[in-house]
Amino acid sequence: MRSSILLPLVASFALLAPSASWAQAPSRQNALKANTRLITVDVVATDSHGDVVRGLSEKDFKVYEDRGVPQEISRFEFVDSSIRAAANNPRAPQIPGLFSNRNMRAPTFAPTVILLDALNTGTVHRMQIRHYMILFLHKIPPDTPVAVFLLGDGLQVVQNFTTDPTILRTAVERISASGMDTEKYPEDDANSASNQLQEADPQAPASVVQSLQNFEKTQYLEMTQQRVSETADAMREIAKYLSGYPGRKNVIWFSEAFPIWIEPDSDFGSDPFMGSGSFEDKVQAAAASLMDAGVAVYPVDARGLETDQAYSAENGITAATSSPAGFAGGLSRENQLRLNSQATMDEVADETGGRTCKNTNDLSGCVFQALKEDSSYYELSYYPTGIKWDNQFHKISVKTTVHGVSLNYRRGFIATDSAVLMKHEDPVKLLKDVCRDPLPSSAIGMSVAALPPDAKGPSANIRYLLTVSPNALTLEPDGQSMRIDAHVAICEFDPAGDNFAFYPKNLSGPVTDASLQSWKKYGVRNIFDYQAKPEDRRLRFAVVDLPSGETGSVDVPAHPTKFIQFATTRLSPKPASAPPVPPQPAPAAAPANPPAPTHVNFRLPSGKGGSLDWSGDKLVYQGDLGIEMSVPAFFQSVYGAKFHCEAGQLKPNDSSSGTPNFVFNFHNSAGLVAVVDLGGAAPSYSGTLPVDPTAKAFFDRLWKSCHCTAP
C-alpha cells in the first residue's frame, strides 16, 4: 500500500513562515524593526548612450541631504532584476484556501502598474491611451508582471499582476473610453453661464457678468481640487499596495494630468486672485508616499504631439475669444494649462525617479526605453543624520565621482516622526480605513490559511490561521523587556460589497524571548473563527502597527462550499502509534486484514518526487526531491490541521486537538517495525527495522519542525 502527499502542501506551510520566497528576497527592513527609519534610494546610472553603467562601487557614490549634509551609506547593492529573479524565483503552486498579500514570485523585470487615468483625461484622448497601452504591451519584455488599473469613479483593478500578454491586452481592450470629460476653464467654455449670458444679451451689466465669472472661477477651482485629491489618494493607495514588494516598482500613468497650479486671471471676473490656487503640496505628498514605497512613476501625456485645440471646431466660439485679442488669450491659456499639467507630471516623475513621456507620438517607445534602463540599478540605503523630523520635505542629492555617468533617483522624502503622529490615533479607525481602501496593503506581509471546518454544510464554522510577518512590526522598550502595539481585524463585507461588519482583536503586549524567536521563524500567528454565511462574502484581514502606522491587509473570498472541498483535500493519512488504516471499500469486498501502508510518496506537478519507504529491509528516503520540500509537506499533513507553533512549541488549534503525538511506528509485510520517537531532545530510533541515514536526515529535519526550530 502507498500513501501519497501532494507537494503543494509544502507551500501551505512555507508561506506561513518567514522563509517564503518573498521573505528570501533582499528586504528594505530588518526582522522586528526598531523605531527608526532607513531611507532607500534606487539609483539608475546610465552613460551618454542611455545604457546602464555597471561595475560601480559604493565609493563611487556620495549622498547628501538638504544643504549638502553628507550621509553615510549603510547598505549598497547593485540590483540586476534577472539575476535576483533567478536566485529567488521558485514557482510555488497555488494552494486552495491560502491567501497572501505578497504572492508574486520574484520577477525578472520590475513589477509594473499601467494606470489609465480617466478622471483627468478627456474622451478623445482616452481612446488614444488604449492604443498606446496596447502598443506598449507588445514591446514589454517577457516575464514582466503587469497590472492594469483604472482611475475614474474610484480606483479599480482591471487586471491584477500577470505575465500573460494576451490576458493583459484583453483587459485593456475591455476598458470603456466613455465617461465624463474634464471641465474646461469657464472663460474658454462656450457652454459656461457667463458666456451664454453675453451671447444672449451683449448689453448685460458688467457687474452681473463679473459676479457670474467670479463664481465660475471658484467652481472651476473646486472641481479641479476634487480631481487632484482623488488622484493623490489613488497614488497613495497604489503606494500602499506595492510597498511590501521588494525592489523597484513602476507605475505608467497615462493621463492628461491636472495643472500644478491655477494662475490669477485679471481678464475674467472682478477679482484676479479668485479661483487661483496651487496643488504642489498634494502632489509632493503623493509623490512622497510613492518614493517611500520604492515606486517610480512614468507619466505619459495622453495628448502626445498635437496642435492647439483652440483651432478645433468642437471648442466653439465664445464671447471671450470672438476677437483676435480674445482668441490669442484663449490660445495662451491653453498652452499654459498644458505646460502646468506637464509640470505636474514632471514633478511626480522627478520626485520618484521616473521620467515623463510628452510631446511625442512614440509614447509607448518612450516608456519602454525608460523601463529597459530601470531593469538594473544601484540600491543605496542610509539612516538620516543631521536633520529634523519636522514632517517637512527634505531633498536628497546623489552624486558620482565617475565622469560621464548620469543618475536618476528619487529627490527626497518627508521627515515624518511616525511615533508622534500615531500617538493619538485610534487603531479601530485605522483598521476600518484599511478595510475601506480600494486595494489591499502589502506594507506588512501577511497570509491567511483556511483550516478545515468543524462541521459539514453551508453554515460550517471556518477557522482561519492568520500569519503576520514580523518584518514591519515595531519593538518598543517595556521595562526590562520589549513589547509590540499591533491590532488586527476581520471585515466581513455584505454580498454587494458596500458595507462591512467589523471584528477587531488587540495583539499588543510584552514580547518574551521565546515568542521573539518563534516570530522570527514562523511569524506572528493567531486563529480566527468565522461563521460562514450561506451566500458568498468577501473578508478582508487587516493589521496595523501603531508605532509606525504601517498597515497590511489581504482579501479572502469566503465561499462556504469551496471550503468544504478544501477540507477534503487537506485531510491526509497521519502516522500514529499504530499503523494507519487506509480507506476501506464496501464491507462486502473488504479484506479481513487490509495491508498496512509501506510508502509515503511526495510529488510535484513537474514530476519530481520522493518516497519514505519501509517495504524492504530498512526504512529509507529516496527520490530526486529534497527533504527540504518533502518534510514540510509531511509535517503539514500530520500536524497542520490541528496544531500551530507558538512560543517554540506546537500548540493545539482548539481543545479538541489534544496533544501532538511524536511517536511513529513503521510496519512492513515481513513483520519488521521501526519506531521513531521525535519527542525527546533528539530523534531516537528502535525496533527490528534498521533506519537508513537518508531516512534519519528526513527525521532530523522533521524533529526541528515538531519543536518549532525549523530553518
Image (cartoon, grey):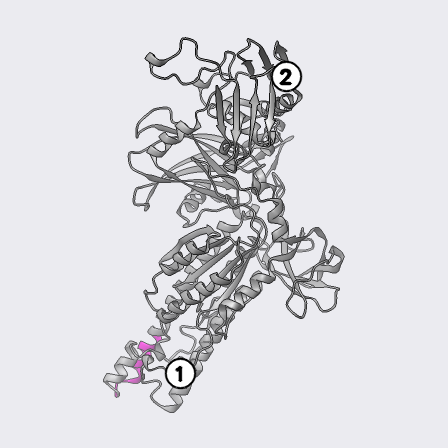
> Is 77 on the left or on the right of 633, as rendered?
right
**Front residue of 366 and 629:** 629
Q: Which residue extends farthest bottom?
A: 324
**Front residue of 679 and 295:** 679
The reply to whether the C-beta atoms of the residues labelled 1 and 2 are less than 8 Å apart is: no
- Indicate the secondary structure of the residue bearing disc 1: helix
As shown in the figure, which amino acid type bears the numbered disc 2? Answer: Val
Report whether residue 10 is seen. Answer: yes
Instruction: Measuring from the top left, give residue 145's x and y in whole percent.
Output: 50, 52
Q: Which residue is mark 2?
A: 691
Instruction: Measuring from the top left, give residue 707's x and y in whole percent.
Output: 59, 23
**Front residue of 598 and 520:** 598
As shown in the figure, which amino acid type bears the numbered disc 1? Answer: Gly
Magenta range:
203-214
Q: Which residue is mark 1?
A: 330
The residue lying at 44 percent from left, 45 percent from top is: 434
The residue lying at 69 percent from left, 55 percent from top is: 386
